[in-house]
Image (tube, rainbow, N blue to C red):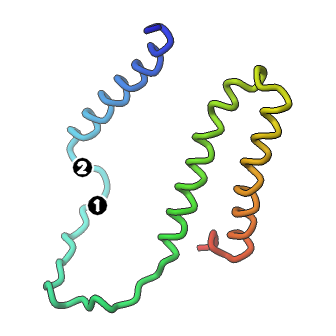
Amino acid sequence: MLEDFLGVLLMLAVAAVLAVLLHALPRRFGPRAPAAEVPEPGAISARQRYATKFLWVALFFALLELGVLLLVPWAVLFRELGSDGVIIVVVFALPVAVGVHYQWRKGVLEW
């Protein structure tokens, strides 16, 4: 049982060690940017408009990642599921593909 998860545990350990090492590195690379000025509490209006393009891109990315995450178990059991598994994935992936096509045509993915 533990042998099945040994690779995952090893990758998590390596990622944790790399994260600690990278965090401990001094920030000497690249030019130093001046500190950003913090506006006064009343300087920004609550009714000020802002672009929602970034929100849509983030939402789109999260939905695609969720779709990929749900396709991983199907890929692992591909041979065992047979043609029923293919039909289920097509039913699952078709709305995702239609959504990507719609967003592409609307220009949501254009910067």
In the rendering, at what x and y percent does residue 59 appear? 52, 63
Q: Secondary structure at mark 2?
A: loop
- Quarter of the image containing the C terminus? bottom right
Above or below for 37 versus 10: below
Residue type pointed to by label 1? Pro
For this view, does 79 lie left or right of residue 52? right
In the rendering, at what x and y percent does residue 66 appear? 56, 48
Q: Residue placed at 40% from the left, 19% from the top?
A: 9
Nearest to the observer: residue 58 or residue 110 = 58
Above or below for 43 versus 37: below
Choose top left, top right, bottom left or bottom right for residue 44. bottom left
Choose top left, top right, bottom left or bottom right for residue 22. top left
Residue type pointed to by label 2? Arg
Q: Residue placed at 72% from the left, 47% from the top?
A: 92
Image mark count? 2
Residue 28, numbered label: 2
Residue 31, numbered label: 1
Query: What is the distance, in whole Å, between disc 2 and disc 1 at their CAs?
Result: 8 Å
In the rendering, at what x and y percent does residue 32 appear? 24, 62
**Neighbourhood count class around disc 1 (C-alpha, 10 Å): few under 14, some 14–19, many 20 upward:** few
For this view, does 7 lie left or right of residue 24? right
